[in-house]
Amino acid sequence: MASELALLSLAALLAGFIDAVAGGGGLIQVPALFNALPAETPATIFGTNKGSSIFGTANAAWRYARRLALPWDIALPASVAAFVFSFVGAATVAWLPKDVVRPLVLGMMIFVVAYTLLKPDFGKLHGKPLPPERVRPWALITGAVLGFYDGFFGPGAGSFMIFAFVGLFGLDFLRASSAAKVVNLTTNAAALCFFIPTGNMLWVTALTMAAFNIAGARVGTRLALRHGSGFVRVIFLVVSTVLIGKFGYDTLLS
């Protein structure tokens, strides 16, 4: 068990770093948990993943909030809607097959990467913001859609959040990533409201991984704040490209 926990701690360290910059840490942490703990149920794996990653997400959100003027007018309404609709998404799993969603997500991820590559200035600077009277309604809609997706499916939610905050609200990549951390924090909390009462949590594993997840998040936020939106954009594109590869592989072989 000690060797498995050591490998999971390394995975949590890298996941915390990636998640703090551009989202997508679950791409590393969830497969690592499945490989290290083959006897556990998927619910326990996902609960343990959320139980560790929420600490890194909270640390990243706190560090961004200390150094940046976060777009609270966007992040707070989106967070409230995401919290509620992540429950709806989780409940939908029982009757809507995830295989139906995977090809759609693959197409959306290809569009996200292509659009970002074709527009070199996309997200590097503040774009044209929405009129003030439209910010809250669109933040609620964005949070509801992405919260539902995160509760139902999950992978790629962080990337979609960043893309939405850049494209809809004119944020640069750095502030979009910081806003996404706030929303991710609420969706993780919503998931834990289900996983903890149902006993789907390995506490020793989750808390050990949490310490390394925080360490990775500290490094990730420090580099993002130091190097700015250009750095976040590069990591965003790398993570999104990996997601395309994963979804493409799963879609073709499922």
Image (cartoon, helix red, strand yellow):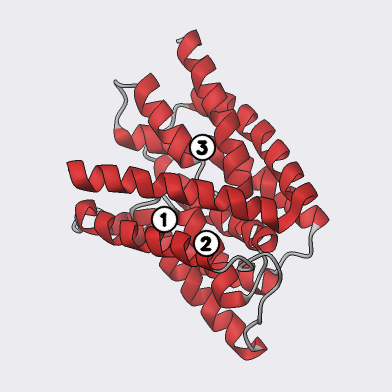
Is tag 3's residue or tag 1's residue first in the polypeptide sequence? 3
Does residue 43 appear left or right of residue 196 in this picture? left
Identify residue type, mark 3.
Gly
Q: Nearer the viewer, mark 1 or mark 2?
A: 2
Residue 140 at x, y = what percent? 51, 75
Q: Which disc is residue 51 wearing?
A: 3
Relative height, residue 152 to residue 71 (above, below): above
What residue would you read off at disc 1?
Answer: 150
User: What separation in Å lies between label 3 and label 2 (alpha carbons)?
Assistant: 34 Å
Q: Nearer the viewer, mark 3 or mark 1?
A: 1
Q: Residue at x 51, y 54 (%)?
A: 158
Q: Secondary structure at mark 2?
A: helix
Q: Residue at x 41, y 41 (%)?
A: 195
Is tag 1's residue or tag 2's residue first in the polypeptide sequence? 2
Identify residue type, mark 2.
Leu
Q: Which disc is residue 117 wearing?
A: 2
> Circle 3: is it few (<14), some (14-19), or many (20+) Cα within 10 Å?
many
User: What separation in Å lies between label 3 and label 1 (alpha carbons)?
Assistant: 15 Å
